Amino acid sequence: MKTKDCSQYFEKIQHEIHINSAKLVELDQAFGDGDLGISMDQGFTAVNEFVKNCKEEDFGKFFMKISKVFNESAPSSLGTILSFGLMGMAKRLNGIENATLNDFQEAFIAGVDNIKEKTGAKLKDKMIIDSLEPAVSAFGRSDNLKEALHFASEAAKNGMEETTKLIAVHGRAAYHKEKTLGHIDGGAYVSYVIFKAITND
């Protein structure tokens, strides 16, 4: 895959985030400031426009630039967290102009690892990692792109739904402790929407 081939995926993500922005606002209003849908919509819209016009062929530089665009356009804690993930991917893909499925699998792992390293987050902390890490792991179950994305999407959905059973330990939601039980984590929902968008189901 070349960097130019990524445009279709970012367009799908932007579309799905946009139509789910009201849902993200609703989820965030429970224990946050309610701007998650707005910031994610702004961030992915900016990234989509950037990718459409980007001529960069090195995947490492490509994702590093996307990370910067997203961080500047989605001023929020999740915006920063996702930027960490994109930075991790960029480091793994540095110097690659024709990426294989295995390259992306390793890049996804590097992205998750960078988020965990930068934030101290781990599974069961009721945040994006609870959907993102299972999705990345499931992606590696197949050497067929369509099938790999299907596995990832299903795992992301399951991980997102499992956050209803968890108590938040990070961010503003952590102040509400047991009250967060029964609620879907907004970040985990974003992860699910991303993988749902790029899965050709």
Image: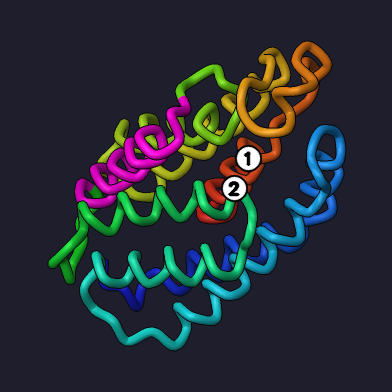
Measuring from the top left, give residue 20's x and y in whole percent: 76, 53
Measuring from the top left, give residue 54's x and y in whole percent: 38, 84
Determine whether, in the image, residue 21 is placed left or right of residue 149.
right
Q: What type is the residue that disc 1 sits on? A: Gly
User: Badge 2: how crowded within 10 Å, few (<14), some, or many (20+)?
Assistant: some
* Residue position for label 2: 78
Determine whether, in the image, residue 25 is placed left or right of residue 51.
right
Q: Earlier in the sequence, mark 1 or mark 2?
A: 2
User: Badge 1: how crowded within 10 Å, few (<14), some, or many (20+)?
Assistant: many
Quadrant location, the N terminus? bottom left
Looking at the rendered structure, the secondary structure element under dot 1 is: helix
Q: Is residue 114 magenta?
A: yes
Range of residues picked out in magenta: 102-121
Between 36 and 22, the one lying in front of the other is: 36
* Residue position for label 1: 187
Residue drawn at point x = 40 percent, y = 48 percent? 85
Between 148 and 71, the one lying in front of the other is: 71
Write down the quadrant of residue 168 in the picture: top right
For this orientation, the residue located farthest to the left is 95
Secondary structure, magenta segment, majority class: helix
Q: What colour scheme governs how the chains and residues are painted in the rendered image of this protein? A: rainbow
